[in-house]
Image (cartoon, rainbow, N blue to C red):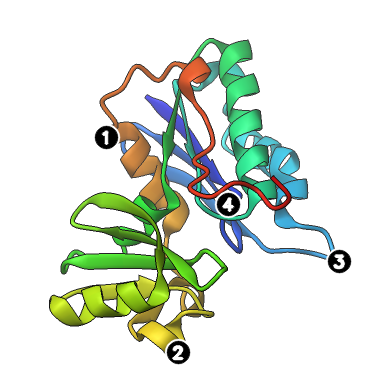
Amino acid sequence: MITLAFDTCLDKMYAVIKKDGQILSSRIVENKDNKYHSAFLISTLQEIMSENHIKPQDIDLIGVNIGPGSFTGIRACVTVARVMAQQLNCRATGVSSLEILSKISDNNPLVALDARKNCAYLYYNGEIKGAVPVDEVKEIITSGNFTVITDDKLKPLLGGISYQGASYPLGEILAELAEQKNDEGDWRKLKPLYIQPPPGV
């Protein structure tokens, strides 16, 4: 089985090819020359497939991050996955960025990402809780023995670790979670996860 996984929702782009349980390629792309990293998605996917002699028709599963995160990144990720899966007639499945980040720790993780408007996208006990006021998140954190995973903006307020502060294999985690999803993998059902509406809506 060949899995192609990619993520343009977070602060870096992750692209992974996995074959029969083995990572063949894992690439991280950052923003370049005032261009958002998702602008390099197609070229990066072409590169890693070519380097590993993988043809698009060889792909069995496409796994993508569906958000929350950058609205531009979410749209890019989901649109490319849907088009590829339709053209290649392969499975496509989405995984939340909150679930991906929760796998940084196996010690009762709580993920809180900046949602603006003094709120955080919150995930704990294996569930997405929505956009929650930061003060409420603080209360939840103090009420339990959580490993807090957050971003650079909220770390001073919530403590814990920032996923932006170290190199984590988020693309590889995404590929693993996509393979574990017990869904139909129908590209028609692959949709962005907008917990809050995009700006201006």
Q: Position of residue 196 (x, y in %)?
A: 53, 50
Residue 180's disc is 1
Q: Is residue 103 visible?
A: no
Quarter residue 178 falls in: top left
> Residue 79, labelled with which disc?
none
Q: Position of residue 162 (x, y in %)?
A: 43, 77
Give the quadrant of residue 117.
bottom right
Residue 33, which numbered label? 3
Read off the residue under disc 2: 156
Instruction: Look at label 3 and name its amino acid.
Output: Asp
Distance between the Cα atoms at labels 1 and 2? 34 Å
Identify the residue shown where x is 61% and y is 49%: 8
Dot 2 crowding, Cα within 10 Å, few <14, some 14–19, many 20+: few
| Residue 148 in view of the camera | yes
Residue displayed at 44% across by 71% down: 163
- Specify few, some or many for label 3: CA neighbours under 10 Å numbering under 14, 14-19, or 20 or more: few
Sequence-first tag of 4 and 1: 4
